[in-house]
Image (cartoon, grey):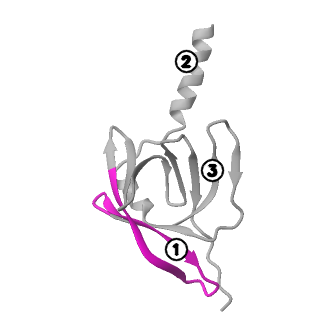
Amino acid sequence: MKKIILFLVFGLFLSCKQSISETDLQNLNGYWEIEKVELPDGDKKEYKVNETIDFFKISDKKGFRSKVMPQIDGTYLTNDLKEDVVIVLKDGDATIQYKTNYANWNEEIIELSKDKLVVKNQQDLEYHYKRPAKFSIK
């Protein structure tokens, strides 16, 4: 009985992760706003307001990520600092490899759709993103 329960729990754990294809990667392009971070111990940190938003531009599994700041007129301000990005696909798993002049790191893509992005870093922090709501005072 214990083996059956363990198998079911393990199966549920594996089923939570999406198989990522090269076609799915087009969903990564654009603006992403962090919604929450899930810590390895199960705690969550919610983000109600974000001063910066991530912008991805990927083509042929290569591109960049930059931080932008939404402005009151609906535009984005950038400092032109970019992190080089390479996407590695293997057996349905996708990893984002980042590189700057100062560091290299990886994040595993757990879920990716038109409106949702979930990545997990090497410290087992799970970042949940959504598309930012457009706003303007025009």
Residue that appears at 57% across and 76% down: 69
CA–CA distance in space, label 3 to label 1: 19 Å
Tag 2: amino acid: Phe
CA–CA distance in space, label 1 to label 2: 44 Å
Q: Residue 79, image x and y in percent?
A: 47, 78
Tag 1: amino acid: Val
Q: Which mark is residue 37?
A: 3
Left or right, 19 with reference to 39: left
CA–CA distance in space, label 2 to label 3: 28 Å
**Neighbour tally class for label 1: few under 14, some 14-19, many 20 plus, Cα within 10 Å:** many
Left or right, 104 with reference to 110: left
Residue that appears at 61% across and 37% down: 40
Q: Camera-side residue: 3 or 97?
A: 97
Position of the N terminus, as image quadrant, is top right
Q: Residue 41, image x and y in percent?
A: 66, 35
Q: Camera-side residue: 65 or 10?
A: 65
Give the mark nearer the N terminus: 1 vs 2.
2
Q: Residue 26, image x and y in percent?
A: 39, 61
Residue at the spot of label 2: 7
Q: Which residues are magenta?
A: 59-87
Identify the element where label 2 is drawn: helix
